[in-house]
Amino acid sequence: MPIAVDIDVMLARRKMSVGELADRVGITPANLAVLKNGRAKAVRFATLAALCEVLKCQPGDLLRWEAEEATVAEATEVASDG
């Protein structure tokens, strides 16, 4: 997936456990684990805002875009055919 989730980085910086973050945000530890491990298909803005509030960070500290290998290879191929 081209969106990488860095919640674990912020947890380490804040010296906070997954359980504590889940409790303070108001979601289950299981749902937080799904999000943290990059298996979530979506995240509500309210949840993202709560994560940012508790972790005292910006959304960009938690989420980042990464190019997929296939996409990069296809773009290179198209550019060389051009």
Image (tube, grey):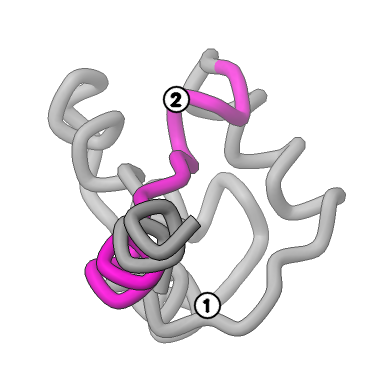
Q: Quadrant of the N terminus?
A: bottom left
What residue is shown at x 52% (from left), y 77% (from top)? 28
- Residue 69 against residue 46 in the figure, above or below: below
Labels 2 & 1 near each other (Cβ < 8 A): no
Residue at image mark 2: 61
Amino acid type indicated by mark 1? Thr
What residue is shown at x 76% (from left), y 37% (from top)? 49
Which residues lie in the magenta part? Answer: 58-74
Q: Is residue 62 left or right of residue 43?
A: left
Q: Nearer the viewer, residue 40 or 22?
A: 40
- Residue 16 against residue 74 in the figure, above or below: above
Residue at image mark 1: 28
- The answer to which quarter of the image holds residue 38 is bottom left
Find residue 19 and name its label: none
Q: Nearer the viewer, residue 17 or 41?
A: 41
Q: Is residue 65 left or right of residue 59?
A: left
Residue 79, visible in the rendered structure: yes
Which one is closest to the eye, mark 2 or mark 1?
2
Q: CA distance from mark 2 to mark 1?
A: 21 Å
Q: Position of residue 39 (x, y in %)?
A: 40, 84
Q: Position of residue 33 (x, y in %)?
A: 34, 75
Amino acid type indicated by mark 2? Asp
Few, some or many residues within 10 Å of mark 1 (<14, 14–19, 20+): some
Few, some or many residues within 10 Å of mark 2 (<14, 14–19, 20+): some
- The answer to which quarter of the image holds residue 6 is top left
Q: Is residue 47 left or right of residue 40?
A: right
Examine the structure image and report whether residue 67 is included in the region drawn in magenta.
yes
What residue is shown at x 66% (from left), y 60% (from top)? 26
Q: Residue furthest front?
A: 82
Examine the structure image and report whether residue 38 is included in the region drawn in magenta.
no
Q: Position of residue 50 (x, y in %)?
A: 71, 40
